[in-house]
Image: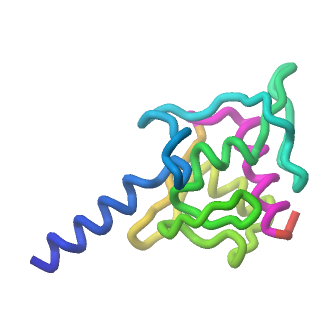
Amino acid sequence: MIRLVVALVVASALAGCGGDDDGDSAAPPGQVITQTTAPPAETGGSTTQGDAPVDGRAIFLQNCSGCHTLADAGTTGKVGPNLDEAKPSYERALMMVRDGGGGGLGVMPKFEGTLTPEQIDAVARYVSNAAGTG
């Protein structure tokens, strides 16, 4: 019985990864945001992909908000680390977004091959800047 309860809790927590908390703009499973016309966040994280801006905050909201807390993004995910507390450097954020990793119940998926290198860079810059280490 306890295993069933734990499995249900883990499954429901993992089901929330990849979308925002209000559920109105989450991408369907397996789909990620590719570009946005929203202005770059004031805390940085914007780069370019061709002529189109790549907004790290928008990509974070689309793909990371269900798992991570980050005050600047207004997210309160509980599966992954609280990024305001973890304060990852740009290099650490870049590695985690690109390669995934972690341990425990919520292993972070790798986004290499799902997001472009420019999008991964934009998310890493946004997270490190928003968390106060960029």
Q: Position of residue 43 (x, y in %)?
A: 88, 56
Q: Predominant secondary structure in magenta?
A: helix
The residue under the point 51% across, 35% down is: 27
Above or below: residue 15 compared with residue 58: below
Rendered image quadrant of residue 54: top right
Q: Position of residue 93 (x, y in %)?
A: 71, 59
The residue most toward the left is 1
Range drawn in magenta: 113-131
Name the residue nearer the viewer: 104 or 127. Answer: 127
The residue under the point 50% across, 32% down is: 31
Above or below: residue 109 compared with residue 25: below
Q: Is residue 5 left or right of residue 79?
A: left
Q: Position of residue 46 (x, y in %)?
A: 85, 41
Name the residue nearer the viewer: 131 or 120. Answer: 131
The residue under the point 86% across, 42% down is: 40
Above or below: residue 40 compared with residue 69: above
As for residue 6 lying within the magenta part, the answer is no
